Amino acid sequence: MTITQLTYVLAIAEQKNFTKAAEKCFVTQPTLSTQIQKLEEELDVLIFDRSKKPIELTDVGRKIVHQARNIVNESERIQDIVDQQKGFIGGEFRIGIIPTIMPTLLPMFLKAFIKKYPKVKLKIEELTTDDIIQRIKEGHLDAAIAATPLEIENIKERVLYYEPFVGYIPEHHRLYSKKKIEVSDLEIDDMLLLEDGHCFRDGIINLCKAFKDQTDDSFQLESGSIETLIKLSNEELGMTLLPYLHTLELNDNLKKNLHHFTEPSPAREVSIIYHRSELKMQIIEALHDVISGIIRGAIAFQNVKIISPLPK
């Protein structure tokens, strides 16, 4: 049994196809098939049910894949140990970022990070929180940037910054005349939200529920993007809440509709998260230092009240 054979097993389990798995592993399909056959003969079991289309794992195959993932991940971390010992900060680093953070945060730190750490090859994906958690557990991501606290077993969280909520309230809305708004002013049936699955949406729901006994059954109008929420709000279909960093990009005509909360401002906690066994800590530390340093200057709010993004 070899690490290469286990890597091939994981590729087939993911692709559910020998040809596609071979392409992913940069080998020919006959080479990959031969190695899998040798492994099955050595173990005296069938890992894959080849009669199914697409290919499926057998019962014992599922257990083998689970253990193979642990073995391959640990073998890859040997190089990480050497890199840390040498103080080397480089290599590929796979990171996921949730959709309500990616568009504003990435342009703020990416250029500075690349310039400071040119040997790090960031592979960045925009993913939902659920997808991020799954991929970190499976070893497909080294880290991610998401709203926390998540309190997921075996996943560590290190806070990057606290980002206040800002009300976007169009003219003619009942709250438009208020210079500053209170959390108790919010009505859940008067709020435009992101589609289900966004942790920013859950944070807003929690914010409303924290002060009133409300449910989200009355939500009728939801959108997949913050930009669309702003447009819908401008059509007098309701108000919405925006992440503070997003408001920095609005033009002056739209900024007149922004209403800050009285302090302490409700805010979300944004962290870099990673598996507890992650060894690429030198890159995680580098990302943390660059991002937190840049955001510290962008967010002037100091007195904030953190609202959990997930229902408790």
Image: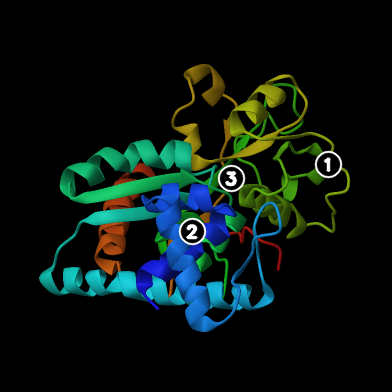
Q: CA distance from mark 3 to mark 1?
A: 23 Å
Write down the residue under mark 2: 11
Spatial separation of the CA atoms under disc 2 and disc 1: 42 Å
Count neighbours of disc 2 (C-alpha within 10 A) and say few if under 14, some if 14 to 19, many if 20 or more: many
Q: Nearer the viewer, residue 155 or 291?
A: 155
The residue under label 1 is 219
Q: Is residue 271 visible?
A: no
Numbered disc 1: secondary structure: loop
User: Which residue is disc 3 drawn over?
Assistant: 261
Looking at the rendered structure, the secondary structure element under dot 3 is loop
Q: Alpha-carbon neighbours of circle 3 within 10 Å: few (<14), some, or many (≥20)?
A: some
Which element is circle 2 on?
helix
Residue 19 place in picture, x, y as percent: 51, 48
Distance of mark 2 from mark 3, alpha carbons?
50 Å
Q: Nearer the viewer, residue 85 or 4?
A: 4
**Which residue does the image show at 54% across and 52% down from the upper left?**
263
Image-based side of 244 in relation to 239, left or right: left
Please name the residue shown 42% across and 65% down the image.
7
Q: In the picture provided, is 88 more to the left or to the right than 65?
A: left
Which one is earlier in the sequence, the residue at label 3 or at label 1?
1
Which residue is nearer to you in this view: 148 or 295? 148
Q: Residue at x 57, y 72 (%)?
A: 151
